[in-house]
Image (tube, coloured by chain):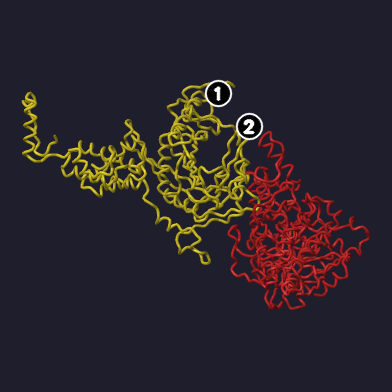
Chain colours: A red, B yellow
Amino acid sequence: MLSLSIGEVSAALRKGRLSATELCRRCLNRIRKTRHLNAYITVTEDLAMKQAQEAELRLTRGKPLGPLDGIPFSVKDNFCTENIETTCASHMLRGYFPPFSATVVQKLLDQGAVLVGKTNLDEFAMGSGSTDSVFGPVRNPWSYSVSYREQSREQDPDSDWVIAGGSSGGSAAAVASLSSFMALGSDTGGSTRNPGSLCGLVALKPTYGLLSRHGLIPLVNSMDVPGIMTRTVHDAATVLDVLQGRDEKDSTTVESAYSPSSLPEEFDVRDICVGVPKEYHAPGMSAETLAQWGRVVALFERAGARVKEVSLPHTQHSIVCYHVLCCCEVASNMARFDGLQYGHRSKVDSSTEALYATTRHEGFNSVVRSRILAGNYFLLKQNYDRYFVKAQQIRRLITEDFRRVFQSGVDVLLTPTTLSDAARYSDFIQEDNRTRSAQEDIFTQPVNVAGLPAVTVPTALSSRGLPISLQLIGQSFQDMKLLTVANWMEQQLDFPIIRFHDDTDQERECKLGS
Amino acid sequence: MVYNIKPRYNVFSPRGEKNFAYVSSQLRGVVGLEIHAQIHATSKLFACSRVAFCSPPNSSVAFLDASLPGTLPVLNRRCVEAAVITGLALNCTINRKSLFDRKHYFYADMPAGYQITQQRLPIAVNGSLIYSYFGGRKRNQVLSRCVRIKQIQLEQDSGKSLHDDQRSQTLIDLNRAGVGLMELVMEADMSCGDEAAAAVRELQLILQTLGTCQGNMSEGQLRVDANVSVHCPGEPLGVRTEVKNINSARYVARAIDYEIQRQKKVLENGGIIVNETRAFDSKSGTTIPMRDKEGLQDYRFMPEPNLPPLFVYEDEASVPAGVNPTQVVMIDRLKAELPELPGVRRARMVDQYKILPEHSFTLVNEDGLTEYFERVVRNTKAEPRKVIGWVMKELLGNLNQQSLKLAQSPVSPEALADLLNVLESGHISSSAAKVVFQEMWKAPEKAVEQLVKELDLGLVSDREKLLKICQKVVDTHPEQSHTKLKWKNTLQSK
């Protein structure tokens, strides 16, 4: 039951074959059983049951609020949730209870969705492994899957578990471990697509400006977007329809000219031109990822789509451009954390300066602090032109690269999402956060730099039994069109549902049947 | 710094360096002003918390004002209009596109750790303010000056800090945090305290007329910082100091003049001026160096990523397709609604009513006095030049004596007009009229005619009666009757 899509479970709820409270209870049980994944920071049991009861009343009366009524979901802990602790996985915000909810969270709640918990992440969304949280790292549910364990030489999963990806690892783990049907992540350089890819999910990064960022605690204001994680493309489209739209409270949202609310009934892949950027043949990409890329290109070709190689010449500068701008905005956004109005406050009170310094030193981990330091350096008057302005100029060139390619008749671009399948935690932590981010974000961050929509779709399991995924990149505000292509791709691929050793037969029946 | 003028004498500083010293009279003051005007609006610049004065501490604080993480700024339309209106009144070029930036520094009354301002491209530039002040030896000459307005920018106000040194704590009130400000930069075209004070007063008047700022300096609605330096005319500008903490219009002149004098003395004694911030101490009338908390402050300016560029449009025709015209600020609409500015009104008063320029200043400076004056003029046969005398002396005299505002005047314009009509018709003499005026002040419910009767101040025109009165006077004062008595052809009072 828990591995059903939103569409399927929503139909079951509406037909009365399943009760909302029963569904919620199952998800909460699942959370308890999968505690070892460390996907959740806060589990909102009482609130969830209350919401489920309200949903049940509506459903029994035949008056559901919409396709998400009664559906359990989780939210990355950098989205504000009213009166529910919001920590950003940092000491700085331990015990912080926001007095308001993020717009996208509120929209889901207004549709009757049931919030089961706040998920774990890299501190302040800085990282690509969900390994730098004050609550400990997130484990990829696939570490415990039949496919991984069967080929693993280790008997003890605790020694060779793999990372969930980051920074929205907790959200990905929640959906992949079947304790949520959908989850909100955030995507600044790939933070929704990366864990989505490693956990075998559909993860959408919408166009910048399509979804409201009000209530999303910012990392890089000019690149952040709320991300959507589901198990099918159709589900992602359902959630996108609920969340998209101009928000008065966010001046960077736009009412896009034409925004369809669902995937089209008819779609002919022969109308599509798929671009394959040659610069995305990055060193470090695994052979299996490369093979999957080739496999899906061939799929499109065989089905009659036009496929052509394209060039995005400024790609090589993207990661540096991203890092400079990211650090600058981080330095600015983190300036508000001084312990005075909210959050952690140091006991040192010899002077205001001392209070600020110790509060910030105690509250932030070294990743955050190093980005603040770098950002402040780049923003110094004498450095501003050479770093910030230069990076913005490169940013425009990167954006122009994409624009030119799309103008030449390409509808979507097909690239890998990550370099390989999920790494073992013990291997991943051999390099520091900055190095890993630079490596892992290679395919995802140019999309944020340009503000485009992109979606990751799982294609196959690797020889290690772990998901490999590919990314489709679309044109600005053509998110539904992007998902249309992704939907077709998903249907051709038949990616397997996750199976765990501890699944009971009954559960397996539920998954296959219904 | 070495100056290329011929010094009168050389002086050796304590360190043995040779400094050039100056004779005070060669040096001239150079004054520029940075003025922060709180925008008169219902809510703050980027949040809908109320702009509240004298409210309990922290009672008007939106989530954004407290910099709660995840909050985003949303621009207040009224503030943009206020800046455009002010820019238009000051002959500025309104930038069709302007940008917002973050100015970073840590201070407890600025919760975000940065202020949102307009550093790169402000909303209005290159304007001018014409002001007048009373100069000449008798200070009754109206001298006209012009100061260039470099720019007007929109920015956030900070909260307030109250330092409690006894308890080693600082109390923060965020009611003011986020209130919209217009920062007006006046170029260094002024040369002394009087000019600066006059410029400030004229600006106050303009802002109050426009309704974009209430301009009350003691309440902090208008804050003036002065940039002061001295130099010999024709030579490069001297090092300047910034003078802060000027809390009233009259302190503007005192603070600046003190600072000019101080700098002149320093240079006279062979010293050098340090680029520093000084606070004006009203008790001693001096400027004191402020604790150097800024030093070489690098504000690490960065564009505000949450606010797209601000576009204002000339008129409806220039609004691009797809943009809702009700959602934009249009300059022509605001231009059409501009009220009569003080300078224009003064000129009109002089031109239309032939009154003296000094009187036009008084009329425009007092809130509502022009309207009062014009109403009297409309309702009376008396010449405006006569009316102005009554307004300046009798009316204002009484108001000032009793510390009343014009709105509290017991004598209405119509009543005064009545009195002047009676005076014009010859029923009373001018000295009697003054007496009647005082009685009207005390008993505003009584009509002029009634009071004249009660006080028996009416002039007698009956020849018979007059003869009787004269005879009586002559009879009772025989000595004086031998003196030449001048009989007027017209009426004479008893």
Query: For this rendering, which residue is in front, A389 or B82?
Result: B82
Q: Looking at the image, tell me whether mark 1 or mark 2 is earlier in sequence order.
A: 1
Determine whether B295 is above or below B369 in the image.
above
Q: Tell me the subunit letter for badge 1.
A: B
Q: Secondary structure at mark 2?
A: loop
Badge 1 is on which residue? B18
Quarter residue B141 falls in: top left
Give the image location of residue B483, x and y in percent.
7, 26
**Image point 55% across, 49% down: which residue?**
B118
Badge 2 is on which residue? B167
- The residue mark sitting in front, 1 or 2, is 2
Label 1 with label 2: CB-CB less than 8 Å = no
**Image point 73% across, 46% down: which residue?**
A364
Separation of disc 1 and disc 2 at Cα?
48 Å
| Amino acid type shown at disc 2 | Arg
Position of the C terminus of chain A by quadrant: bottom right
Query: For this rendering, which residue is in front, B266 or B277?
Result: B277
Q: Tell me the subunit letter for badge 2.
A: B
Q: Can see residue B402?
A: yes
Q: Can see residue A450?
A: no
Q: Which mark is residue A249?
A: none
Determine whether B488 is above or below A283 in the image.
above
Give the image location of residue A84, x and y in percent.
70, 54
Quarter residue B232 falls in: top left
Determine whether B233 is above or below A426 in the image.
above
Quarter residue B485 falls in: top left
Q: Is residue B428 left or right of residue A176?
A: left
| Amino acid type shown at disc 1 | Lys
Task: Bin the neighbour count of mark 2 within 10 Å (Cα to Cα): few under 14, some 14-19, many 20 and up.
Answer: few
Query: For this rendering, which residue is in front, A86 or A490?
Result: A86
